[in-house]
Image (cartoon, rainbow, N blue to C red):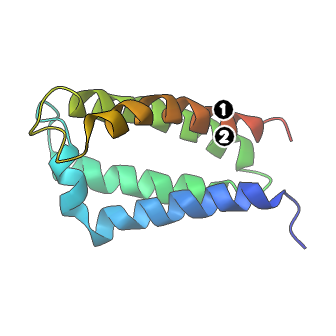
């Protein structure tokens, strides 16, 4: 019925839901968007769209590998936001510093998780 392991679909669902949240609650993402990036609202919507498309792309044989690499690139780009949030109290958006610091290695875990699907 499903050709891939359940955890691939879990990852796909995570990205689709996270992407949808960019459209449902855009203010959350606008608060953490680095001030030096142009057109923050457009970037929030584009990043949400990317998460949705890449999440769905994981579910199909023809797009699984490309989507996996796309997720890795996207997470690398998102590191910009994570480092920006460490630059000050306002930028942290009320999130404790220890959580912000934990998110950085978590990005690399998520990258490895996505990479693991290029091998199957």
Between 71 and 6, the residue placed more toward the observer is 6
Q: Quadrant of the N terminus?
A: bottom right
Residue at left offset 32%, top offset 61%: 22
Q: CA distance from mark 2 to mark 1?
A: 5 Å
Residue at left offset 47%, top offset 36%: 75
* Secondary structure category for the residue under label 2: helix
From the top left corner, tell me how far across and down residue 117 is, in percent: 76, 42
In the displayed structure, 33 sits above or below 45; it is above
33 left or right, relative to 76: left
Residue at left offset 17%, top offset 46%: 93
Counting the numbered discs, the total is 2
Is there CB contact under 8 Å for labels 2 and 1? yes
Tell me if mark 1 has few (under 14), some (14-19) or many (20+) residues whose alpha carbon lies within 10 angstroms of its own.
few
Between 59 and 114, the residue placed more toward the observer is 114
From the top left corner, tell me how far across and down residue 41 is, in percent: 18, 53
96 left or right, relative to 14: left
Residue 82 in sight from this viewpoint: yes
Q: Which label number is shown at residue 83?
A: none
* Secondary structure category for the residue under label 1: helix
Residue at left offset 56%, top offset 34%: 72
In the displayed structure, 51 sits above or below 80; it is below
From the top left corner, tell me how far across and down residue 76 is, in percent: 46, 29
From the top left corner, tell me how far across and down residue 6 is, in percent: 79, 61
Between 74 and 61, the residue placed more toward the observer is 74
Label 2, on which residue?
A: 114
Residue 59 in sight from this viewpoint: no
Q: Quadrant of the C terminus?
A: top right
Q: Which label number is shown at residue 112?
A: 1
In the displayed structure, 11 sits above or below 106; it is below
Tell me if mark 2 has few (under 14), some (14-19) or many (20+) residues whose alpha carbon lies within 10 angstroms of its own.
many
């Amino acid at each position: 019925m499903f050709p891939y392991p359940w955890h691939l679909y879990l990852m796909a669902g995570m990205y689709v839901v996270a992407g949808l949240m960019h459209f449902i609650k855009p203010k959350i993402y606008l608060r953490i968007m680095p001030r030096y990036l142009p057109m923050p609202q457009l970037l929030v919507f584009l990043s949400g769209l990317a998460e949705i498309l890449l999440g769905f792309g994981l579910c199909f044989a023809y797009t699984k590998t490309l989507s996996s690499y796309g997720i890795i690139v996207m997470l690398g780009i998102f590191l910009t936001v994570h480092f920006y949030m460490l630059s000050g109290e306002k930028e942290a958006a009320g999130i404790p510093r220890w959580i912000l610091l934990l998110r950085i290695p978590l990005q690399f875990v998520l990258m490895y998780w996505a990479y693991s699907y290029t091998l199957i």
